[in-house]
Amino acid sequence: MSDKIENLKGAGKKGGTQFPKYSLKHLEQFLSSLNNKTYTNAITIEQLNAGVFGIGANSSSGKIKSSALKQFGLIEGDYKKFKATELCSKIVISEQNEKQKNFQESFNKVKIFTNTFNTFHNSKIEKSKISQYAVSTLKVHPELKEEFMKIFIESAEISGLCTVHGNIVSLLDLELVKNDGDILTDLEDAEFSDDEIQDVPDNTKSLSASSKTTGKISNINVNIDVDPSMDPEKLEKLLKLLKNYGAI
């Protein structure tokens, strides 16, 4: 399955929830070089492009790859000082069984991937169902739903979380530990530029949520502490989002 989605990657800023634009399967080929080249010193984006990705020093696609690495918890720093994380090093030196566990840890750092897996785990589903869920529940931009599906599946597969037979994806009977409720604060007004490295905003200070997913987000217990300094418009949007999910 190809990860080359340059047409969409180069389309500029789109609305919707952020997700890595390259899968763990695609990124694996760069991890050993990344680990070796940053073992003693951090490197710049230009050095990362040329020395790790094997592309032009000023190539914009390198920013998208580095953004994916960062979302998976495999690289840290900024354009001037990139360095492989401890998790990246663990993946590089581990044997196959341990490597899959480390990939699962990396997979679990992407909230919407964890949410999707926990929703469909212990089931066999058509690929199209993942695409539909991405748009309807996770608020992924509709034009990116197929890419989300492909990157999710490739990342889950290399992590030992699913097998693929034609158009059917079989997900293991395993619930990942990340709390699905955390994603609720990321679903509205989440716009990210694919050529920028940035974390999903941490809007969870005023929201404590826990949920157990059985086919869809449900059974959510929510405690909201209203901070007098909170932007009223922001609070209104948060309450509206929770109401849409039936949490209040």
Image (cartoon, rainbow, N blue to C red):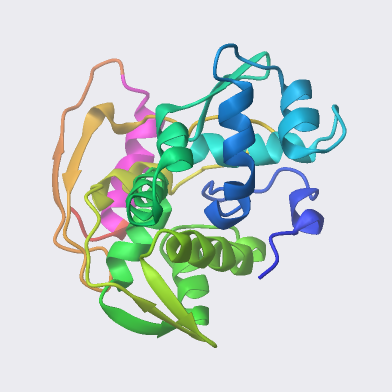
Per the image, is 158 magenta?
Answer: no
Assign the magenta stretch its main secondary structure.
helix
Q: Which quarter of the picture shows residue 143?
A: bottom right
Residue 194: tell me if it is visible. no
**Numbered range of the magenta stretch:** 230-243
Residue 181: tell me if it is visible. yes
Q: What residue sits 38% from the left and 43% below the top? A: 109
Taking the image as shown, residue 12 lies to the left or right of residue 170, namely: right
Q: Quadrant of the N terminus?
A: bottom right
Taking the image as shown, residue 142 lies to the left or right of residue 93, namely: right
Q: Give percent across and percent down for residue 196.
A: 67, 31
Q: Which quarter of the picture shows residue 229?
A: top left
Q: Give percent across and percent down for residue 94.
A: 39, 44
Q: Give percent across and percent down for residue 45.
A: 72, 23
Taking the image as shown, residue 15 lies to the left or right of residue 245, namely: right
Residue situated in front as seen by the camera: 62 or 130:
62
Task: Please tell me whether residue 90 is drawn above or below residue 125 in the rendered image.
Answer: above
Q: What residue sits 71% from the left and 43% below the top? A: 13
Total label count?
A: 0
Task: Please tell me whether residue 113 is drawn above or below residue 1 in the rendered image.
Answer: above
Q: Which quarter of the picture shows residue 171?
A: bottom left
Task: Please tell me whether residue 56 is drawn above or below residue 136 in the rendered image.
Answer: above
